[in-house]
Amino acid sequence: MIANTTAKRLGLNSFLITSGLDSIRQAFERTLDFARSQERLRDENQFLRQVIRGQIGQTVVFDDGGLFFSTLEEPAEDILELLRREIPLIQGETRRRITRNLDGMLYSIRAQRITAGSLSCVAFFFTARKSPIPSGQMGIRFSTSVEAEDAFYNSIFSFAGTVGDQQEEIARVNQSTAPIMVAGEDGTGKEPIISIIYLRSALKNNPLVSVNCSLLNEKSWAFLLEHHNSPLADEGNTLYFSSVDVLTAERRGQLLAALSEMEVCRRNRVIFSCVCQSGEYITLAGAEIMDKLCCLSLYLPPLCSQPDRIPPLVNLSLSHLNVELARQIVGAEPEAIELLKSFSWPHNYTQFRRVIGELAVTAEGQIITAESVRSLLKKERYVGAFSTGAENAAAPLDLNRTLDEISRDVAFRVLEETGGNQTAAAKRLGISRTTLWRLTRDV
């Protein structure tokens, strides 16, 4: 009794055995309870040690019962709700990196499921910073694997079969961590192919950072090259630079210097794309980047080089469109199919999807007629002639036509460049507004 009293006074755990078998049994049961309590404390201690080791800013932890731990100074339901939506995507103990915009703030999040003994929680470690300018104006977009997958399956390329043709090439380039150059004409599906490369890579749990070179302004260019929060300063991500052809020689040199000096390609997976003109396999800008960074190459052929793909594509496109149309379009006349097969498709699959959509909506019956195809493709020929592509360059003139048709192409190009101002276009062409109207009136 004296020893028991002294132990309690010193803050020690003790068990007093008086006499008899029941007293001994009770002492053992209390000992087991104490051991279980210590085990729980040890598990929690180990768990919190892992949490603290992962600290990069704020920490929020959820268990099965809800919010378990948070370092947020005040309740922030919008942030907590954003994090709750990510919980089902955290599988196993694989770390996942996420970037989210919320109320003008850019959140860089690292998520991980942590298990210690009987505890299993999802921990989020994140920092927040004010976006330098809205991401849509910057030309820099962050996507998760779920968003990349959704974007792919909502495009024509999910059923067009183009990815199936590139399966071996995708597997080949994904065996290496070397940079990749994806080349092809406008509308051949570079972004969907890059989404698949990303989704099948070892970095799919980290963000896909897309840099649209045609949208970069002075501020976003400075942010990309100089800011400490630039994607170039991060690691473990997939960086995709689209339309590198629009970069000036000076900017191209600056980008190549930054990628080399900062060892970006060693710390991240880097992918480029360039937009070729008809008959090209790579552009001069694309070739320069390929040579300087020793890129692997992936070429996407144009739709016009695969006319046998048109008939099944028409049927597949109509099947998808029929879900939303008030009436069912069952197919197209044989002559209509031949017209579609012989068209040049300057904007390839994206133009094809739009054309089929317009033909389906404007069809008078359940069959797309040759006359409706002929009428629509007549307009599309001029769209292809003067529309700006992804590299802000007009397509070359098709000289295998009559002088009147070529003159119309030139007139439409100048109209486009003058923003539709007929007076300015006529002055530039050296003709009257009446002559300009006569050149364009039939379309």
Image (spheres, rainbow, N blue to C red):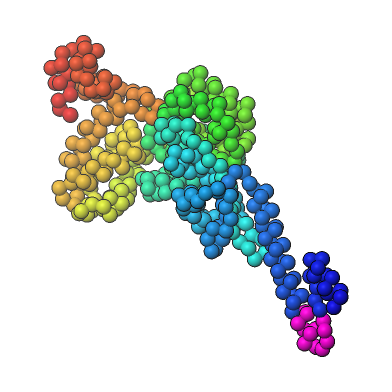
Q: Say which of 153 and 134 sits in front.
A: 134
* In the displayed structure image, the side of residue 205 where residue 433 appears, left or right: left
Q: Is residue 21 above or below residue 7?
A: below
> Left of 93 or right of it: where is 335?
left
Q: Chief secondary structure of the magenta span?
A: helix
Using the rendered view, name the quadrant where residue 171 is placed: top right
Give the image location of residue 264, x and y in percent: 60, 32
Question: Could you tell me residue 245's position as x and y percent?
Answer: 45, 25
Q: Which range of residues does the magenta coloring cover?
A: 17-28
Quick check: can you spot residue 221?
yes
Tell me if residue 148 is in the magenta stretch: no
Q: Residue at x 40, y 27 (%)?
A: 391
Give residue 186's position: percent from left, percent from top. 38, 33
On the rendered image, what quadrant is the N terminus found in? bottom right
Question: In this view of the protein, which residue sits in the foreground, 432 or 45?
Answer: 45
- Residue 224 position (above or below residue 325): above
Residue depicted at 45% across the width and 47% down the height: 147
Q: Is residue 199 above or below residue 427?
A: below
Q: Residue at x 83, y 74 (%)?
A: 4
Visible residue check, residue 244: no
- The answer to if 27 sits in the magenta stretch is yes
